[in-house]
Amino acid sequence: MSTTFSRRFSSSILLWMRSDQPRQTGMNYWKGPHSKIISASPGLHEYRQTHLAETNPGLWPATPGFETEIPAGRRIDGVAQVAFQSAFSVLAGREQNKLAFKDEVNVFRRTLLYLGLPNWSRWYDVARPGERVASRVLVYLRRRDGVGGRAFRRFINDQLAPALAGTGALQELRTETFLPWSKALWNTPNVAHDNPGDQQFHASVMLGFPDTATQAAFFAGRSLASLSIGLAQIASAAHAYQVAEALTFVRDGVILPHYQE
């Protein structure tokens, strides 16, 4: 399977819905009024909302010394994933971001921004002709204490991603590695941004499958179990979320008239 990829400059905002209203009410507002604010930001290459399933105990196979069960108190509801056209796009979107800041309190109770440097995100060419992604899993990885950031990124890029691509099971593979988290990068009003050091993440991996049977076989298979043993030497946690919907609002720099799944 090909391990060719394109490099991207991207960010991810982890989101928790307000608890004083039904969860689905918040999810609907996010993909309705709130999405229009983000989509209008200049300089976006892609804007995708990843809506995570409400029940998400963790799909990653149990591995000794490695946290794979997602703590209920920190279970994410969704992720806003943005790829920029260039590094200057972040500055171009400042005015639109001000509107997003004010609107967050209408739908979210906690938001956390993770950002990498330009070219730290990689989108791999693993799709087979004529097949579409029918099932996705989003994995968040936490770096093990004592492992440096450069060594961690090297493992993700040079070992983990090629091994995942080589399984032949994937229709989508995207990786992001993050700068150290900073509240100052996304300190929006009236919304929580608590993120203790032992709960922070350092990378994400999006896995797309042609069907749910292929996904189930992948997570139950020997290849992933073996890979997980090596991953546990450099990471302390892998929280694998079942994705309910992946909705694209901006693609190739164009605002879509209606989101596409």
Image (tube, rainbow, N blue to C red):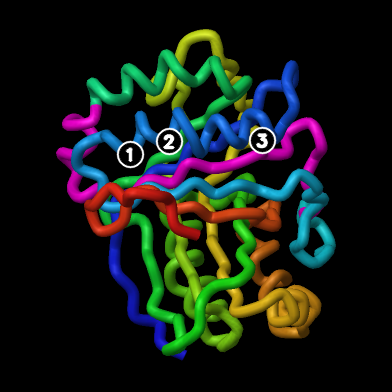
Task: Tell me the kind of residue under disc 3.
Answer: Gln
Whether residue 151 can be seen here: no
Marks 1 and 2 in Cβ contact (< 8 Å) = yes
The residue positioned 24% from the left and 52% from the top of the image is 254
Which residues are drawn in magenta? 68-93
The residue positioned 27% from the left and 25% from the top of the image is 96
Task: Tell me the kind of residue under disc 1.
Answer: Ser
12 or 34: nearer the viewer: 34
**Is the residue 213 above or below the residue 68 in the image?**
below
Whether residue 261 can be seen here: yes
**Is the residue 143 above or below the residue 2 in the image?**
above
| Disc marking residue 199 | 3
Marks 3 and 1 in Cβ contact (< 8 Å) = no
Determine which residue is flagged by label 1: 39
The image shows residue 260 at horizontal and vertical percentages of 44, 57
Alpha carbons under labels 1 and 2: distance apart: 6 Å
Density class for disc 1 (Cα within 10 Å; few <14, some 14-19, many ≥20) is many
Residue 12 falls in image quadrant: top left
The residue positioned 63% from the left and 50% from the top of the image is 144
First of labels 3, 1 by sequence position: 1
The residue positioned 70% from the left and 70% from the top of the image is 228
| Disc marking residue 35 | 2
